[in-house]
Image (tube, grey):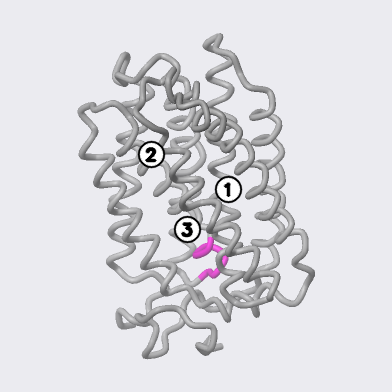
Amino acid sequence: MNAEDRPVPRPYVATSVATGVLTVIATAVGLFVPGFYRDAPVLLPQVYGQDLLTLAVAVPAFVVSLFYATRGSLRGYVMWLGVTGYLLYTYASYAFMTAFNELYLVYVALLWLTLFTFVGGMVRLDAVALKRAVGDGPVRSYVAFQALLVALVGVLWLSEIVPASVAGTVPESVADAGLPTSVIYSLDLGVVLPAFALSAYLLRQRRPWGYAFTAVLLVKAATLGGAVLSMIWFMAADGQPVVLPQVVIFGLLTLLSVGLMARLLLSIERSRTVDHSPKSDGPPTEERSSGG
């Protein structure tokens, strides 16, 4: 089997292995080395919650899904990409927001590794084959969920940003953390929410890449939602005030994303992971043959 015939080419397997090893190191140090993080006290429960979910849930899911993806499982490939997207989001926030510590270069390395893997993996994903594998069932629940996520998270963040912008002040959550700005606002409003909006639009049109983006984003939403709930638990245990609307919103979105993710992944039949046609290394196109 040559490089083009492998469901997951060797470079992406190598970057995934490196990602897994560095993620275990980063989360284990953060969780078990006392006083390692130098962030403001209000942020510490959040990084501990993120580390716990990443180590206990995301890493095992990442390893298992990579194992099946390398054996040609389309379901495993989608899961692998989704968890990679979660790790990309996580270590983008660590690289840009966490107070400088001895693992700074590890965070930067993880940012590069996950970005390289995610983009390359998405380019190789055969969206036509995925659509065929999922079948012609109703998609309204997936479209509605993504629209709901965009609306709820957008309103939640804008309710903090707009009043501060009008008043010429800084949002309370940013000021309490001692940060110049919020990387989470930027990532969510600038990347994540537009991605969900585009995914919902393409899926509503039943275009192949709507199925592909939806599948990957549901995995990312489920893992990130779990991380947010873990952060909230650590905050409550630390005696910090917890904003009830945030608990309700993220709890609801997490439950819905897990249910829809499981439903979509279970609907995927045996099919090829990627397109091995001569154009497979180019930009994804909807007209590309699935190759069976």
Q: Nearer the viewer, mark 1 or mark 2?
A: 2
**Location of residue 200 with respect to 58 vertically, above or below:** below
Under mark 3, the amino acid is: Trp
Specify the amino acid type for callout 2: Ser
Secondary structure category for the residue under label 3: helix
Label 3: how many Cα within 10 Å (few below 14, some 14–19, many 20+): many
Q: Residue at x 61, y 41 (%)?
A: 153
**Residue 190: x percent and y percent?**
46, 50
Q: Is 120 or 24 nearer to us in this picture? A: 120
Residue 221: which numbered mark, if any? 1
Residue linked to disc 2 = 93
- Label 3 sits on residue: 80
Whole-percent x, y for residue 29 in the image? 31, 27
| Mark positioned earlier in the residue sequence (3 or 2) | 3
**Label disc, if present, on residue 83 of the rendered structure:** none
| Cα gap from disc 3 to disc 2, whole angstroms | 20 Å
Q: Position of residue 117 (x, y in %)?
A: 35, 60
| Residue nearer the viewer, 215 or 268 | 215
Secondary structure found at label 2: helix
Rendering quarter of residue 143: bottom right
- Callout 1 secondary element: helix
State how far apart marks 1 and 2 are (Cα): 16 Å
Dividing the picture into quarters, in which one does residue 155 lie? top right
Indicate which disc, 1 or 2, sits on the residue closer to the N terminus: 2
Q: Is residue 61 magenta?
A: no
Position above or below: 209 against 24: below
Are circles 1 and 3 on residues that touch, CB within 8 Å? Answer: no
| Label 2 Cα crowd, 10 Å radius (few <14 / some 14-19 / many 20+) | some
Give the quarter of the figure containing the N terminus: bottom left
Write down the region rendered in magenta: 73-78
Count the marks: 3
